[in-house]
Image (cartoon, rainbow, N blue to C red):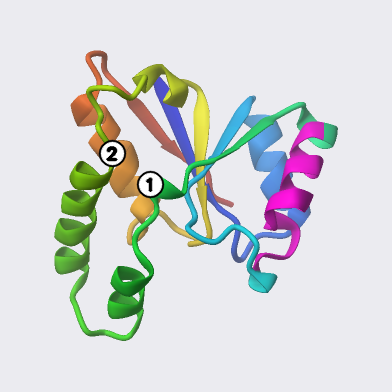
Amino acid sequence: MNIYTIGFTKKSAREFFELLLDNDIKKIIDIRLRNNSQLAGFAKAKDLKYFLEEIGDIAYIHKPEFAPSKELLNSWRNDEITWKEYEKIYLNDLKNKVDFNKLEIDIFDNSCLLCSENLPEKCHRRLLAEFIDKKSPEKVQIHHLKV
């Protein structure tokens, strides 16, 4: 199973969509809590869905249950907690929010997890991809798309 991840910040629309096309992405799973923020630019939900379909025949799915809570995100951004604490809380919240026994893991196969962070190192998309790898009965190859 292959899972890709991408963040849209610090990328032009051209760079973003070329990364998706160059890697033959067929499905985006948007794991942002708020997918309509004005800061999202070309990645606002309605626009993104249209661009994905028109430019690359790429499906769009929004799964906010995989996003960190607003409180957790704010705690991290305001330096109230460390990255290690963030990871622990996010993964614990994920286990409580999502029943992975009922979730069809195949939804993630050859899909690309989308959020806003430019790089995956300190982003929940990396944590989710690694969590899926642990839960999946088959080996997961994780590919972080970056410029």
Q: Is residue 42 magenta?
A: yes
Residue at 22%, 84% (x, y): give it: 80
Residue at 38%, 70% (x, y): give it: 70
Q: CA distance from mark 2 to mark 1?
A: 8 Å
Rendering coords of residue 87 (x, y %): 20, 58
Residue lying furthest right in this view? 54
Please provide the residue range marked out in magenta.
Answer: 40-53
Q: Is residue 112 magenta?
A: no
Are there few (<14), some (14-19), or many (20+) residues within 10 Å of tag 2? few
Relative to 42, residue 78 above or below: below
Relative to 123, residue 18 above or below: above
Label 2 vs label 1, nearer the camera: 2
User: In the picture, which quadrant includes the N terminus?
Assistant: top left
Which amino acid, mark 2? Val
Nearer-N-terminus badge (2/1): 1
The answer to whether any part of residue 24 appears in the image is yes
Q: Which residue position is annotated with label 2?
A: 98
Rendering coords of residue 52 (x, y %): 75, 38
Dots 2 and 1: beta carbons under 8 Å?
yes
At numbered mark 1, what does the secondary structure look like: helix, strand or loop? helix
Rendering coords of residue 129 (x, y %): 33, 38
The answer to whether any part of residue 25 appears in the image is no
Q: Which residue position is annotated with label 1?
A: 66
Determine which of the numbered discs, if any, sits on residue 95 in the image: none
Between 99 and 32, the one lying in front of the other is 99
